[in-house]
Structures are given as C-alpha cells and as structure tokens.
Image (spheres, rainbow, N blue to C red):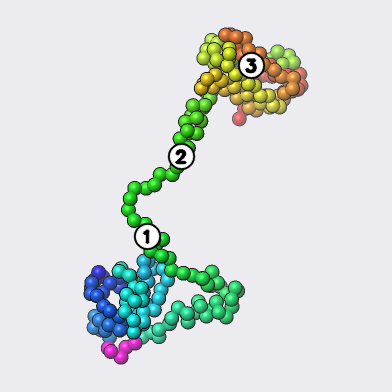
Amino acid sequence: MATAEEKPGELSLADWRGQRVRGSQELKEQLREPLGLTAETPLALSYQNGSRNSVKKVLEEKQGLAEQGVEDGACVTVKVDAMEVRPENSFLRESIRNNGGNSYYYAHANEKELPPELRYVYGGDPIKLESNTEGDALKAEKAAKALTHYSWADEGDFVCIYVSAEGEPEAIEAAKDGDVKVQFEARSAELRISKDSKEYALSLRQLEGEIVPDESKHRVSAGKRVTLKMKKKRTVTWTRLQQSK
C-alpha cells in the first residue's frame, strides 16, 4: 500500500510500497529519502498488529521483522527527532510502577495483545440465535380470543355480566364441556373459556365499584350463556361498568 496518513511528528504506514524488508534498520534507511531526512536524523519505529487499538511495540534494530512478530498489514509508526520510548519505560508503565493500584492507569497493568482469532471475524452467514420453536408455537396456539360481545346489568346487591350464544357462539359452545375459569378481585373480573387448543377471554379492569370476591360467582347455562354475578361491596347504583381510563 503506497498511501500514508500524516500526523504532527509521525507517519504511519500499513506497508511501505509493497517492499519486503528484513529489519528495523533497513526499514529506516528506506524511509529517509521519501521523508527527506538525513542519515543523522534519529528515527524511532514501532508497530501495531491488527488495528490502532492493539498494543504498540517498539521495532528492534538487530532483529528481523518476522522475528519480532510483525504481521502482514501491520501499522508502522515513524517518529522523527524523537527518543525511542519502550513500552516498559512509558509514562503509563512508570505511573503503574510508582503508584501501584492507585495509578490512574492501573486498568492497563495486565494489558495483553489479543490473539488474531479474537481480533478478526471472517465472512459467512450470520448465525441465527436459537429459538424455542415449540414454545413459540404453543404460545401462539394458546393466545386467547377476546370476548367483546357481552351485556351487563345492575341488580341491586349484584352486578351481572352476560356472555350469550347470540354474541359469542363459539365461546358458549366451548363452555358446554370445556374448561371455564373465573377470577374475581376487588376491582376486576376475568373469565376464561378453553377447549382443545382454543381459548376465549373476557378481562374487566377498573370496575366502577369494589366487589366482594368470595361472595361473587359464575354460572354456565349450557348452550345459552355464561353469567358472572359480582357481589357489590357497597350497595350503590352503578351507572357504568368500568371507570374511565
């Protein structure tokens, strides 16, 4: 790669014009001419494998690049007129040595370079997360159909809800020999009718007044209707079934 990114005091190269160099000293000599530097100008070289976030290491002059672990595509940083500072002598490491666990940089104390298999992710189709197909199908199958056709009446001490065959024929048919459950609470009532894989539900929240759950009941009139008989806590007339939201 022949491109380079310039910053004040440094020049970073992913590779130098595709040339293969054996060591740090040879690389320095090849860099002096294009950078317009004399042989007396001190240069300090370091490299990073993988990305700019990986650990930066000083290039040794007496060792080959391969020996030092420089990989293809590594980023080489050239510092001009700068003293070579090794990682172990950096301000960060000096701070950790002097201040130990109280150092601002203590989190970097055991910093290690990531191995290649953790730095790169190579192609392929995305891996689909496992799903509980059977569980999802079961939930969908058991999703209750809301009962929306019903009537109600204030009958003195009780308030009655009527779900009839005229409005909800399938639910009333299922109630004949299916499972009918009713749950009463102080301000709510819920009716659930289920048979085989079908379920029907009527949920009433924020009732106009409080009811007495233990004295409330329901009745199934086979083929005709299901009645919820809710006992009022206070005998006052209900002008509506539920409070406004």
Q: Is mark 3 on a helix, strand or loop?
A: strand
| Foreground: disc 2 or disc 3 | 2
Which residue appears farthest toward the front when viewing the image? 67
* Residue 139 at x, y percent in the picture: 51, 30
Q: What element carries label 1?
A: loop
Mark 2 and mark 3 lie on one chain; the one further toward the N terminus is: 2
Q: Is residue 154 visible?
A: yes
Quadrant including the N terminus: bottom left
Query: Marks 2 and 3: CB-CB under 8 Å?
Result: no
Q: Which mark is residue 161?
A: 3
Write down the quadrant of residue 23 in the picture: bottom left
Image point (24%, 75%), residue name: 20
Q: How many badges with numbers are in the image?
A: 3
Write down the quadrant of residue 83 in the picture: bottom left
* Residue 17 at x, y percent in the picture: 23, 73
Q: Distance between the residues labelled 1 and 3?
A: 65 Å
**Magenta-highlighted residues:** 38-42
**Label 2 Cα neighbours within 10 Å, binned few <14 / some 14-19 / many ≥20:** few
> Label 1 is placed on what type of residue?
Tyr
Does the magenta run of residues contain 182?
Answer: no
Q: How far apart are marks 2 and 1 (CA)?
A: 27 Å
> Label 2 is placed on what type of residue?
Ser
Mark 1 and mark 3 lie on one chain; the one further toward the N terminus is: 1
Residue indicated by mark 1: 120
Front-most of residues 111 and 167: 111
Image point (52%, 80%), residue name: 94
| Foreground: disc 1 or disc 3 | 1
